[in-house]
Image (cartoon, rainbow, N blue to C red):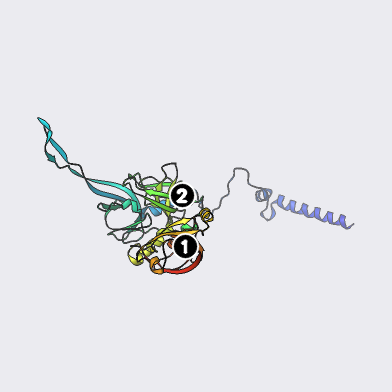
């Protein structure tokens, strides 16, 4: 009986609701109820009248970065005088006897050869050392708005393919420096520079293809070359003339300084990690020059295989010590084998140069040295490389 009574009550309630809707009481009808309950048909769109949504696409990211960063990217040009060889004048009746010489003419060559980016409002600009390697040439910097400035001073890093040039200017837009230690393989990379020394503010896009590479960097315009370790590899097109320009992440921060392009393959370019540049710039800002920690030894790494074959420890075999150097003053000798620096074992992949390069001039390092078949400990106060 209870079940039957409940069924009758539910049926009556449904009839009451249906009658109310059909009669249009309370402002309800079947069309309104149907529109509230029905799902949108395929192909229909929702309307959101109260809020505007911006769809972020890769194209938006790139254009925003380029628009924001381009005023900080510059072109580096060179102006130098080249003299042709002397011309011999001959006697037309006796060509074996020179009649005299005529001095060869000279010509001034101006050319865009590289790129750079602004790091201070008063005219400090980062570029590659090989871009400004000619000591007797005059250099100029051209900004995005085609203003040209003469370079009044060049500071060259002795250890990296890096230089800072100074121009007399105010109100420049410094670029934001990122953190190259946070780079991940596969992330977006944007390069800006003067491609081929001709096409200013050229933009190319790719990804980070690798980190920790070793390369030989140079300038096709000047013929110089330099070996570099721990550089960034990217497939963003880097051409001659891009050297010294910024490699950017999707936030518009510099993560590298474009340095070289591989001659053996396509879509393989390289950049110096920006953290190397930041350390050098901080050092420059505090000292006015590129001071580097200096120990004063010539060495050769002993590999694990060599150490096993010769029954000697793995480490840095000291071939010679510079007279009066920090190492010499600390008692380091030729034929010593440095096995550890500050407790860190030296291997082929973690050699002495890397260990010293992590320090600053004036830092004290502890060396574990294998000498006369036993270990000894020396402390060295690192100096400055002139």
Residue 210 relative to residue 97: left or right: right
Is 92 above or below relative to 106? above
Which of the two discs, 1 and 2, labels the residue nearer the N terminus? Answer: 2
Which mark lies nearer to you, 1 or 2?
1
Q: Which residue appears at 71% of the width and 49% of the height?
A: 22
Label 1 SS: strand
Quadrant of image for the C terminus:
bottom left
Q: Which residue is mark 1?
A: 338
Q: Residue drawn at (41%, 64%), measured in percent from left and top?
A: 333
Number of other residues with Cα within 10 Å of mark 2, as a class: few under 14, some 14 to 19, many 20 or more: many
Q: Residue at x 31, y 51 (%)?
A: 76
Between 322 and 212, the one nearer to me in the picture: 322
From this viewpoint, is residue 330 visible? Answer: yes
Category of crowding for the residue at label 1, using alpha-carbon neighbours closer than 10 angstroms: few (below 14), some (14–19), many (at least 20):
many
Residue furthest front in the image = 372
Q: Where residue 355 is drawn, which disc sits there?
A: none
Horizontal side of 28 relative to 333 (left or right) equals right
Q: Position of residue 45 (x, y in %)?
A: 58, 46
In this view, the residue in front, 83 or 272, is 83
Mark 2 highlights which residue? 233
Q: Quadrant of residue 158?
A: bottom left
**Residue 294 position within the rendered picture, expressed as x and y whole percent measured from the top left:** 38, 63
Nearest to the observer: residue 70 or residue 112: 112
| Element type where label 2 sits in the image | strand
Q: How many marks?
A: 2
x and y, in percent, of residue 350 in the image: 49, 58
Q: Is residue 193 left or right of residue 151?
A: right
Q: Is residue 274 above or below residue 224?
A: below
| Residue 197 in picture, x, y percent from top left | 33, 45
Q: Is residue 74 visible?
A: no
């Amino acid at each position: 009986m209870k079940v039957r009574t409940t069924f009758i009550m539910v049926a009556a309630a449904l009839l009451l609701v249906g009658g109310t809707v059909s009669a249009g009481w309370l402002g309800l009808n079947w069309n309104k109820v149907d529109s509230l309950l029905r799902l949108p048909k395929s192909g229909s769109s929702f309307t959101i009248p109260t809020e505007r949504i911006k769809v972020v696409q890769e194209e938006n990211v790139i254009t925003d970065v380029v628009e924001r960063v381009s005023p900080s990217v510059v072109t580096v040009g060179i102006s130098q005088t080249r003299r042709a060889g002397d011309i011999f004048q001959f006697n037309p009746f006796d060509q074996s006897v020179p009649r005299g010489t005529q001095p060869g003419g000279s010509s001034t060559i101006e050319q865009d050869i590289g790129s750079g980016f602004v790091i201070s409002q008063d005219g400090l600009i980062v570029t590659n050392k090989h871009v400004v390697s000619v000591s007797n040439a005059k250099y100029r910097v051209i900004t995005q708005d085609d203003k040209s400035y003469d370079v009044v001073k060049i500071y060259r890093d002795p250890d990296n393919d890096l230089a800072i040039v100074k121009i007399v200017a105010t109100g420049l837009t410094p670029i934001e420096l990122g953190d190259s230690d946070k780079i991940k393989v596969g992330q977006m990379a944007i390069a800006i520079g003067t491609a081929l020394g001709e096409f200013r503010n050229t933009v190319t896009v790719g990804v980070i293809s690798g980190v920790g590479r070793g390369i030989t960097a140079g300038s096709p315009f000047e013929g110089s070359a330099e070996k570099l370790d721990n550089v960034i590899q990217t497939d963003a097109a880097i051409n001659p003339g891009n050297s010294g320009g910024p490699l950017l992440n999707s936030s518009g921060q510099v993560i590298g300084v474009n340095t070289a392009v591989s001659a053996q393959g396509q879509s393989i370019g390289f950049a110096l990690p920006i953290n190397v540049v930041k350390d050098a710039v901080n050092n420059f800002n505090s000292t006015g020059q590129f001071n580097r920690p200096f120990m004063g030894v010539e060495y050769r790494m002993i590999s694990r295989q060599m150490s096993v074959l010769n029954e000697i420890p793995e480490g840095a075999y000291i071939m010679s010590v510079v007279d009066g150097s920090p190492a010499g003053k600390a008692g380091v000798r030729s034929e010593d084998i440095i096995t550890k620096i500050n407790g860190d074992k030296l291997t082929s992949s973690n050699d002495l140069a890397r260990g010293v390069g992590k320090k600053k001039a004036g830092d004290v390092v502890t060396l574990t040295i294998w000498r006369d078949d036993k270990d000894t400990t020396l402390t060295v106060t690192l100096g400055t490389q002139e």
